[in-house]
Amino acid sequence: MPADRPIRWTRRVLLVCGLSLCLGSAGCGYGVGGRASRLPPGLRVIAVPALENNTRRYRVEQRFTQAIIREFLARSSYRIVSTEESADAVLRGRITNLESIPVVFDTTINPNTNVVTGRATTMLISVSLSVWLEQKDSGTILYRNDNFLFREPYEISTDIQSFFDEQGPALDRLSRDFASRLVAAVLENF
């Protein structure tokens, strides 16, 4: 038996197995994620007016509303408008609570004072929202959650030399993550 024959046989077996795997997975039913919707088929245009802000955070409703609009545009084929006149449905919401709680603290010792700094390094952000999607012509509530709760930990900088005001970028990250979860809940009708 020639020495290269087992190598050729092994290559052929691997090639056949690889092709079988590729062809077998081609028809397994997977598709592009995030485009499905359980909303009524006649729905084409959704109005997303500015959320109400019942918190003490200045203009947080603007960031959240913009993030929701961007997420709808990215994850669905619905046309999104800001006014109700031309809409088939209206998504309304009220931010009822927004709080941040420190959950992890820095345990490094300040070399100048030999004292543990104790600065917060991770904050748990919680957002509560009352939200509903109403079909405009019939008044039917397509989605409603009076206590939509979003909770996520976020790390913050502890380096004094490189520290800058992280509130703006942190709220942008928070609003994107929040909008992603909210739009998924509305589209999949959780």
Image (spheres, rainbow, N blue to C red):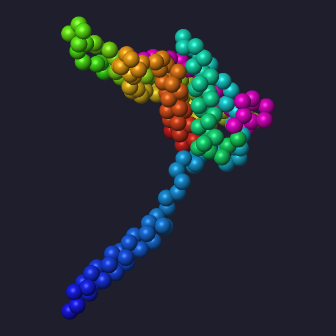
Q: Which residues are magenta?
A: 80-101
* Left or right of 65 in this view: 19: left
Quadrant the N terminus occupies:
bottom left
| Residue 152 lies in quadrant | top left
| Residue 69 lies in quadrant | top right
Image coords of residue 125 (percent x, y): 43, 22
| Overall secondary structure of the magenta section | strand
Q: Nearer the viewer, residue 26 or 112?
A: 112
Q: Is residue 30 magenta?
A: no
> Can residue 146 be seen here?
no
**141 versus 126 height, above or below:** below
Furthest residue toward bottom: 1
Residue drawn 34% across the image and 81% down it: 12
Residue drawn 28% across the image and 12% down it: 117
Residue drawn 69% across the image and 37% down it: 80
| Residue 70 lies in quadrant | top right
Image coords of residue 103 (percent x, y): 33, 20
Image coords of residue 54 (percent x, y): 57, 14
